[in-house]
Image (spheres, rainbow, N blue to C red):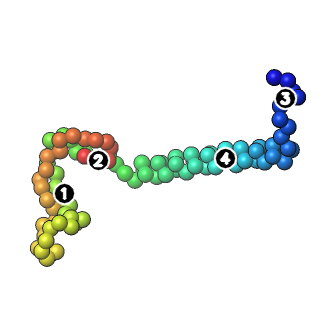
Amino acid sequence: MLKKDLVDIHLTASSFKIMLDKERHHAKKFMQDSFEYSKERWDKSHKPPDFTVEDLVLVSTLNFNNIKGPKKLKYSFAGPFMIKELHGPNSV
């Protein structure tokens, strides 16, 4: 390709592109730093559950909306349920 075939870019447009690329890099760096900070804080305050497969657990009924009757007569927990499989560090 010859130099005469290339399209000339206005000086302002090229400087704007340089500025925009710097800002994108800056934003990407700060987003990564924020992610690492949040992960560090979360890891510090949370411990992995000590459940194992075939443990019996109780489930809180606090957010169950399908149980009728007065609240004070509802059971606080449902179960026991057996853990069949662990899906990740925070879910069973």
Report how far apart the C-alphas of labels 3 and 2 lie in the structure.
Answer: 60 Å
Q: Which kind of residue does numbered mark 2 sit on?
A: Ser
Q: Position of residue 74 (x, y in %)?
A: 13, 70
**Apparent side of residue 86 relative to residue 38 in the rendered image (left or right):** left
Residues tagged 4 and 2 counted as in contact (Cβ below 8 A): no
**Viewer-proximal residue among 77 and 44:** 77
Dot 3 falls on a residue whose secondary structure is helix
- Which amino acid is tagged 3? Asp
* Occupied quadrant, residue 21: top right
Q: Residue furthest top?
A: 1
- Neighbour class for label 3 at 10 Å: few (<14), some, many (≥20)? few
Give the label on residue 28, or none.
none
Label of residue 5 in the image: 3
Residue where numbered disc 4 is placed: 24
Q: Which residue is mark 2?
A: 91
Left or right, 85 with respect to 11, comes to left
Of label 4 and label 1, which has the lower sequence position?
4
Determine contact: label 4, label 3, CB under 8 Å: no
Q: Which residue is the site of mark 1?
A: 59
Q: CA distance from mark 2 to mark 1?
A: 13 Å
Q: Is residue 11 left or right of residue 28?
A: right
Q: Please report the residue visible at 52 percent of the width from the left and 46 percent of the height from the top.
A: 36
Decide which of tag 3 and tag 2 comes sooner along the chain: 3
Q: How far apart are labels 4 and 3 at the CA level?
A: 30 Å
Instruction: Please report the residue visible at 15 percent of the width from the left and 67 percent of the height from the top.
Output: 67
Distance between the alpha carbons at the discs numbered 3 and 1: 71 Å
Secondary element type, mark 4: helix
Q: Nearer the viewer, mark 4 or mark 3?
A: 3
Element class at badge 2: loop
**Residue type pointed to by label 1:** Val
Q: In the current view of this chain or complex, which residue is farthest to the front? A: 5
Structural distance between the alpha carbons of marks 4 and 1? 46 Å
